[in-house]
Amino acid sequence: MRNLFAVAVLTGIYSFLMASVMLVLDAPDVALTEASVGAGVGTVLLLGTLYLTKTDEARPIHSVALPLFVAVGTAAILIFGVTGTPPFGAADTPVQLAGPDYINRSLPETGIVNVVSSVLASYRGFDTLGETVVIFTAGIAILMLLKRATPPGAGRKD
Amino acid sequence: MNEFVDLAGRLVSHYNQWITVFLMVSGLYIVIARGNMVKKLVGLSLFQTSVYLLYLSAGKILGGTAPILDPDFTVYSHPLPHVLILTAIVVGVATLALGLALVVRINEAYGTIEEDEIFKQDDDRA
């Protein structure tokens, strides 16, 4: 597909479908975030970039043999790795060991019914602080990058 | 025969992992094979969503429900992967925005967002 507008629209649809998969996987908070931030903001950012740059992709000149080889090789290693993981949806896996602890302690310790909220804002509050720092840094970097991006001949004021 | 049933059962019970692996290597392939920088970033976000799927499917319990406490339910999926992926989604969009800003800047400097044309311009200049 050479038209990048179609790519942006398909990416938005993909994000939205991924949000519904997340809903099926018992993660409504994550599904809402993916639908609003991933499908919404992400698509807006892609479309904005296409407005500022080119909307058509050039024909590829390289052979796809090497990327295909790397991808298939990685797939083989990953498939070898995941055969050792527990089956989907099992309750007695090592991942699930800490789950009941969070579920049982959330209401008495924080008074919050939604366990995801209590973990996000209370038990792992520093993670959320770090996330905010990352967004802040990215925002500053974008402002610095785009401030220089005046079109040639428009005359810089600084 | 028994071995075949065992293998088939193992294939079916890990189907979430096959989808994850497929999405992950598709993203990897797009990042390596495509010269267009917007498409590279789309491939990168495809790669990221495969990681979201890996985490969320590890936390899922069949027959469980979303981790919002209610007297009617006793089995809940693990809340910790949900929190980690919430953070990862927002950070992923922040990095996507930064990458797209870089693409806009590169387009201002080179007049193209194709990797091959940028390398060619650099070679001509050198």
Image: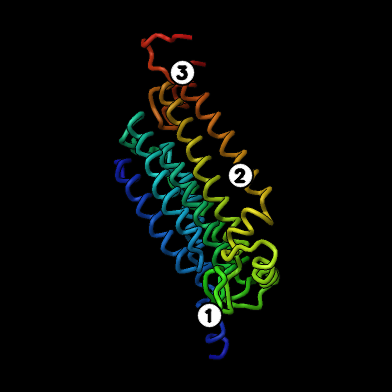
Chain letter belonging to callout 1? B
Chain letter belonging to callout 2? A
In the structure shown, which secondary structural element does the residue marked by tag 2 occupy?
A: helix
Q: How far apart are marks 1 and 3 (CA)?
A: 70 Å
Query: Residue A78: x percent and y percent?
Result: 59, 62
* Residue B44 shows in the view: yes
- Residue under label 2, please give it: A131
Q: Going from the N terminus, do you reach mark 1 or mark 3 first? A: 1
For label 3, the crowd category at 10 Å Cα-Cα, with few meaning under 14, some 14 to 19 and many 20 or more, is: few
Instruction: State the mark number for residue B124.
Output: 3
Foreground tag (2 vs 1):
1
* Looking at the image, residue A35 lies above or below residue A106: above
Give the residue type that dot 2 points to: Glu
In the structure shown, which secondary structural element does the residue marked by tag 1 occupy?
A: loop
Q: Hey, which quadrant is residue B3 in on the image? A: bottom right
* Residue A88 shows in the view: no
For label 1, the crowd category at 10 Å Cα-Cα, with few meaning under 14, some 14 to 19 and many 20 or more, is: few
